[in-house]
Amino acid sequence: MPTSTYDKIKKSALQLFAQRGYYGTSLNDVANMVGIKKPSLYAHFKNKDELYKSIIIELVDVFTKKITLTHQNSKQQSTKEQLLGMVISMVDFWKDEEFGLLYKRSMLFPEEQFQALTHEQFVKSETHTTEILNRIFTEAISTEQIGEQPILPLIDAFYCLIDGLFVQRFFYEPEDYEAKVSHAFDHYWKGIHQGGISCTGSSS
């Protein structure tokens, strides 16, 4: 099935925004990459802002769907395997030369006029991910795969693990990065499997 002009515009805009950022990309650049004249873009998007917003919304939507699919496909696995699958799914997303790079640009360095949208999409994504993590940890405790403990610290620690891996993704060679992912997750799992830290901060 032939790709529509609308989809070609979105694909080209994603690549350019990821590589050059919002200010480094013009509608002329997008039109040239698609192979159309700039005025033809306005049949699909009112202006560059609208195009950029649609890309950011799609970015978070793709991320959310990836996490959801990972969880659905791993429900029969152990808690450790489910959590590792979540980590790998996120890491693979960040490795994408377009989605991963744009995620970094938009989430860490959002343009002022898009800060509200970026925050809204971030909260949407985190809320969805938190719901999945809550289900995983609730089941893990009920099936005694991990000890009885508060769930919120488990989720917070998971996000700290992910945030660290996200930043390091852009500073290390693939082989070194894969090792860091493995080491970080192994220590995270050992901590929560052994009971982690109680809400008062003392070892349980």
Image (spheres, rainbow, N blue to C red):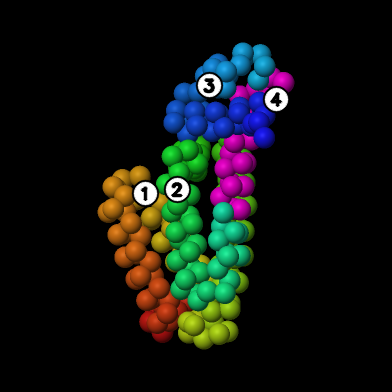
Q: Looking at the image, is mark 3 or mark 1 nearer the viewer?
A: 3
Q: Which element is circle 1 on? A: loop
Q: Residue at x 60, y 28 (%)?
A: 8
Do tag 3 and tag 2 residues touch (Cβ < 8 Å)? no
Report the magenta residues as a range: 42-65
Do tag 1 and tag 2 residues touch (Cβ < 8 Å)? yes
Which residue position is annotated with label 1?
A: 169
Which residue position is annotated with label 2?
A: 94
Q: Is residue 44 left or right of residue 32?
A: right
Residue 121 percent location from the top left of the image: 61, 46
Do tag 3 and tag 4 residues touch (Cβ < 8 Å)? no
Q: Residue at x 61, y 13 (%)?
A: 37
Residue 49 percent location from the top left of the image: 62, 27
Q: Residue at x 54, y 28 (%)?
A: 12
The numbered mark, 4 or 2, whose residue comes first in the sequence reads: 4
Distance from Cα at disc 3 to Cα at disc 1: 28 Å
Res. 188 image quadrant = bottom left
The numbered mark, 3 or 4, whose residue comes first in the sequence reads: 3
Vertical relation: 9 (above or below) 148: above
Q: Which of the labelled discs sits on residue 33, or is there none?
A: 3
Q: Principal SS element in the magenta part?
A: helix
Q: Which element is circle 4 on? A: loop
Q: Residue at x 51, y 69 (%)?
A: 82
Which residue position is annotated with label 4?
A: 44
